[in-house]
Amino acid sequence: MTRNDIKDLILEIIEDIDDEAEFDNLDPDQPLRDQLDLDSMDFLDIVMELRKRHKLQIPEEDYPQLATLNSCTNYLEPLLKEA
């Protein structure tokens, strides 16, 4: 899976959770929660969807690494390399 595929995957999951999410002005280096008004349950839904779709186990202590679109991509890239 390429970096762009991973970014698309994250945005697709967010859109599934919140169909009103606006990605037009999304800054990939700013926290997703702040930009998209995601709450903690939305964030957990993203993590659970990654687990469901790709069998990824993301430890809770790694959640801060999923804060921005770029940090998500950096974290997930080695895990999804073969996907």
Image (tube, grey):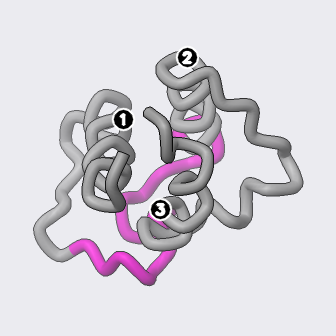
Query: Horizontally, is 8 left or right of 41 in the view?
Result: left
SS at mark 3 in the image:
helix
Q: Is residue 10 above or below residue 7?
A: above
Q: How far apart, in angstroms, are the residues tagged by discs 1 and 3?
A: 13 Å
Callout 3 amino acid: Thr
In primary-sequence order, the first of circles 2 and 1 is 1
Q: Secondary structure at mark 1?
A: helix
Please give the name of the residue rendered at 73% of the width and 55% of the height, measured from the top-left corner.
Answer: 63
Question: Alpha-carbon distance for marks 2 and 3?
Answer: 18 Å
Circle 1 is placed at which residue position? 13
Q: Is residue 57 magenta?
A: no
Instruction: Name the residue at 27% across, 38% down.
Output: 12
- Image: magenta residue range: 26-42
Residue visible at 59% across and 54% down?
Answer: 78
Q: Which residue is mark 3?
A: 73
Q: Residue furthest top?
A: 52
In this picture, residue 52 sits left or right of residue 25: right
> Quadrant of the rendered structure where residue 50 is?
top right
